[in-house]
Structure formats: structure tokens, C-alpha cells
Amino acid sequence: MNDTKRISMLNLSLFITILGLVSCEEKVDLTIEKPNVILIITDDQGFGDIGYYGNPNIKTPVLDSLARKSVRFDEFLVSPVCAPTRASIMTGKHAMSVGVHDTYRGGATMAGSEITIAELLQKSNYKTGMIGKWHLGDNYPMRPQDQGFDYTLNHLSGGIGQYGDWPNTLKKDSSYFNPVLWKNGKQYQSKGYCTDVFTEAAIEFVEENKKDPFFLYLSFNAPHAPLQLPKEYYDMYKDIDPDAGFDKDGRPFPNVTPHSKENARKVYGMISNIDDNLGLLFQKLKELKLDENTLVIFMTDNGPQHPRYVGGMRGKKGSVFQGGVRVPSFWCFPKKFKNPRDIMNPAHHYDILPTLAEFCGVELPKYLNIEGRSLLPLLTNKTKELPEKFIHRYWHRSSPVKYKNVSTRKGNLKLVGRGKDSMGQDQFELFDLSQDPYEQNDISEKNKQKTQDLKIEMDCWLDKMMAEEHIINSPRPIIGTSFENPVMLNQNDGLFVKDEHLKKELIYWDVLVSKTKTYTITIHLDSRLNTDGKLELILGNQTKVLNFKGNNQTYLSIKDIEIQEGKLTIMPKIFINRNNKMQYKYPFYIEIEG
């Protein structure tokens, strides 16, 4: 734990109060024991990928049942892509303020100094577990075990088998089966389909901590691509038409290609597998008599990755339109939330931290300066609505760019920045969601003053986010500590720069060296070297050169490198001889031991 976080954590209040909220409709037992919390999130499951929201082609009986007995947020808004959503869930803040602005290329590393909901609950004697997809940094001090989780079982990068998830990358079309995971920071060879593995671990966590209050963050990587699933679940949907049943719906429907239809069939199978697994988890809660005192939250991280039914909304994953940011959100707690209903007040991913803190009786330190606010008054029916706030959403691949895929909303008016037109002029669209929930009719020309007012707010927010310290200086992995040795730097968390001479993007990593000492650096490759070549290992202002012979090796090592304490940029440049020309080859991942 770094000094900044250590000081912050010492300042946390350890005083735990018994929750005593009285709503206008519900009486609360003042002798209630500490509630358990299970936060379930799926990856790329859109608003329409569930039977409860009007999709007749998908089988989700467990989720449908959960929805019917839950308090449901009709308009729960997240970020357009996954890592920013997860950063906001963990911290209660806008993702860019904690260093997260993208899903890879170094944009998905959350500052280790941030205080997470897991740390707050851990300090309040909760047992904390994180299972599945983390996607907020794979090195110390950004890993889940560094951010407040007692038990962790997770994959690397943004998804199993992605290039940053180097233990599974080369398995290609079978990466979701028997994946290599990280259990409490150590490599772990799992057996089975990934969703089944994660659910089994969740059930074990619940069983082992049944006598203590616990917080479980169950973060399924499915149904994210690659769309791999057990055959019996694919067979459930192989003959269906995912577009059938909507011809009389009256709502907009995306143009869906045959390829996207096939994707939908696979996604639906993956979701039905999740549904069955959740049935097993909920049954275990019932067997252990924990179901009445366990808050179960179900949500997804953004809209669907491929075009398919999304409740008539415009957009999909990556878009600030409603189809990209509006997701299901079910909150089930039988002991207190005895009136299942829809809440129409917009709610957000960054509201989860303050809500759970109040729900679990944890006092929030004022210095956290979070964006979110507690939803408990809505959940307990103490109020029907919270005061309006400006709602900002943004995403652009790599570095932030003004007015491209950004939205600012106040009440029902939503301004969307669409980037520049062919003449280089900034484009904006204005929508009234009360009259146009599917965002089909731009009213900016008829409402120029309202458009301008919202643009002023958009400018203020963008300027603030782009000036955040963690955006200007991305969070850095720390090498040379006892917390992680060796350190494995993967491509997901790497940074890229264009080399004009080579006409290629080169990968590098910005790290923090904790102690001056001697290190061994090994460059791992994704294929065997069968030609001669040269490694240029740039370490700040020094360069180590290694000429090598191609002997079918898969790594190159340089030992006894003295590296000084402080900030350091590491750039390995590998050149191999092909047809008497030296060609650049990307490193797969880097191992640093010292």
C-alpha cells in the first residue's frame, strides 16, 4: 500500500452504526444484523438481453424472477464501455477523475491511491471478495487485492483471451474453457467453462463467509466476445430468429446482418448459462438461510456490443445514446425492500458506493469528494425522486477529444456532441427524452439557447476531466516491491507512440521504480524466434542491446540491469531479420524481477 493510500485509510472512520432508516411505507428492524451484499455485473449484456424487458427470444427465468421481486431502476445509467463503468462503481467518481478513460492502451488503469467500496467495507469488518473481470489495472497497486478485496479470482486485461490476458491468449477459440486465472495473486489453472468456474468460486466464498458479513463483487466476463459457450447453450438458440416478434412493436429496431443474428444467438446462450448459474447461487443463499439478509444487485456494464434488440433505444456499446448507457439494475433485499417497483428517477454507477456505504452503516469520509449520492431514500420509498443533477457521459478511443461522443443532460434535455462535420465544425444534437425517448428527433435548431446552456455545462465538465491529474499522468505500476515480484506488464496496460521512421506504433510502459537495485528483464513473445535479430531495451536514458540467434526461443532476457529509483519508461524494440530486412516485432508481455 502506498503512503498516500495508507494515510487515507488511517483517516477512515471505524465507527459502525446499525442501520435505522424509517420510510413512509416500511418499518425497519433496529436490531437488524449487518447485511451481506452481492453485486453482480455482466459484460456487454444490453438492456434488451433479458426476458423481463420484452425480449421473447431469450430464456432468463432466474433474472426475470429476480426483476419481479426487486426494486428496479428504470433508467440506470453507466459509461459507454466497461472499464470506466467499473471504475465508477468502485470509487463513486467519474472514471476520468481516477485515471480510467478507455478499455486498453493504458486507459484502463485506476489510481492505486483511490479508496474503493471494498476498502470501506473491509475496514468495517466485512469479508470482501472479487471474482471474474477486474479491468482496472493488472499490476500493483491497482489489482483487486491491492484495492480492498480479501479474496480474488480474476482474469487479466479486459477479457479472457484478449492480448493482455497472456496466459490464455494463444488458446484462441477455446480460451473461455479451463482458463488460467489469478487466485489471490497467484496463477491458478481452473477447470470448466469460465462462467461456471466463477459461480462455483462465488458459492464457495459465500459458504466460507456465512458467519460474517460479506461483500461479493461477482463480475462475469460473459457475454463479452469472443463468443464462446458450451454446446448445449448454443443449441438452445441455433434455430431461432433473434429479430422475430418485434414487427408490431412500434419501436425503432437496428439493422441486423446475418452475422449479427448469429452473434445474438451465441450471446443469448451465454446469458442463459449465466442465468442458470445465478439460480445455483441464489439456491445456496436460501439453503444457508442468507437470502433474507443479503442484498443482491444485478446490473450490466454497458449496452450490447453487436446490433440487436435493445428496447428500441438508439446506439449500442461505445455510444452515449441511451442504447449504450442505459442498463438493467435490480436491487433485491427481502428484509427491507418489500415493495417491488420501478423507480423512474435516473440513477448511476457512481451512486453505488455511497448507497452501499449508507446501507451497510459505513460513514463516508468527506475527503473522498465523490460524484455519486445514496439511492437509499429511493430504495426504501422515503422519497420518490432526488434533486436533478447534470449527467455527463463520454468515451473516445485513446486520448480524450472534445465534443466527440459526449453527452450532457439536465432533466429530460440531453445534448450529444457528435464530433466535427466535413467542414470541421462541431456537431451537436439536442433531444427531449420525455417526448423522444428513442432519441430520433434533433431539436437543437429550434432550441438554440437551451443547446448553448447545455454546451456551457459540457465544456466545464470536459475541461475539468481533461485537467485531472490521473488523466494527465496515467497511474503507474510499481516495480521492485514485495507485493508483486516478478511484475508482468501486459499489452492492455501498455502505452503506444507512433514511430515515423518505422511507420509503426511502438509499445512502452511507464512505471515507478520503488528501489534502486539490480533487475532481470525478460521479453516474452507470442511465437518462436527462428531468425536472427536484435533487442533494444530502452530504460529511460539508458539502452541495453542484445543481439540474438533464432533458436526457436519464446523469450529474450537481459540480467543484472541496475535501475534507479523513480519514474521510468520501458520500451522494448525487437527487430528480426526477414529477407535481409530488419522488421519490428511486438513484445507479448514483459517480466521484471528484482
Image (cartoon, rainbow, N blue to C red):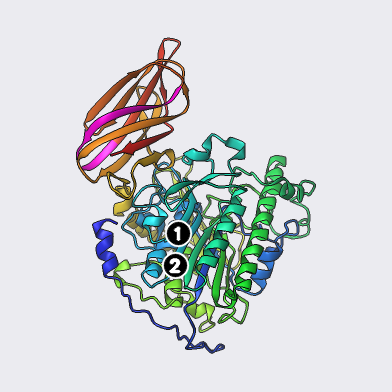
Q: Residues within 10 Å of mark 2 (few under 14, many from 20)?
A: many
Percent from the top left, x then y, of residue 186?
43, 48
* Callout 2: SS: strand
Is residue 31 placed above or below 507 in the rendered structure?
below
Mark identifier at residue 151: 1
Q: Amino acid at mark 2?
A: Lys
Question: As drawn, is 173 to the left or to the right of 80?
Answer: right
> In this orientation, does residue 467 appear?
no
Q: Quadrant of the N terminus?
A: bottom left
Residue occupied by mark 2? 127
Percent from the top left, x then y, of residue 167?
49, 39
Q: Residue at x 34, y 47 (%)?
A: 484
> In this orientation, does residue 140 appear?
yes
Percent from the top left, x then y, of residue 27?
54, 89
Q: Residue at x 46, y 17 (%)?
A: 530
Question: As drawn, is 561 to the left or to the right of 370?
Answer: left
Percent from the top left, x then y, of residue 145?
40, 56
Q: Residue at x 44, y 67 (%)?
A: 127
Q: Residues within 10 Å of mark 1 (few under 14, many from 20)?
A: some
Residue at the limit of the structure toward the right, as seen here: 239
Is residue 540 placed above or below 207 in the rendered structure?
above
Q: Is residue 566 magenta?
A: yes
* Magenta segment: 553-569
Q: Quadrant of the C terminus?
A: top left
Is residue 121 placed above or below 465 in the rendered structure?
below
Q: Are marks 2 and 1 in contact (CB under 8 Å)?
A: yes
Most common SS among magenta residues: strand
Q: Which of 393/129 is in front?
A: 129
Q: Amino acid at mark 1?
A: Tyr
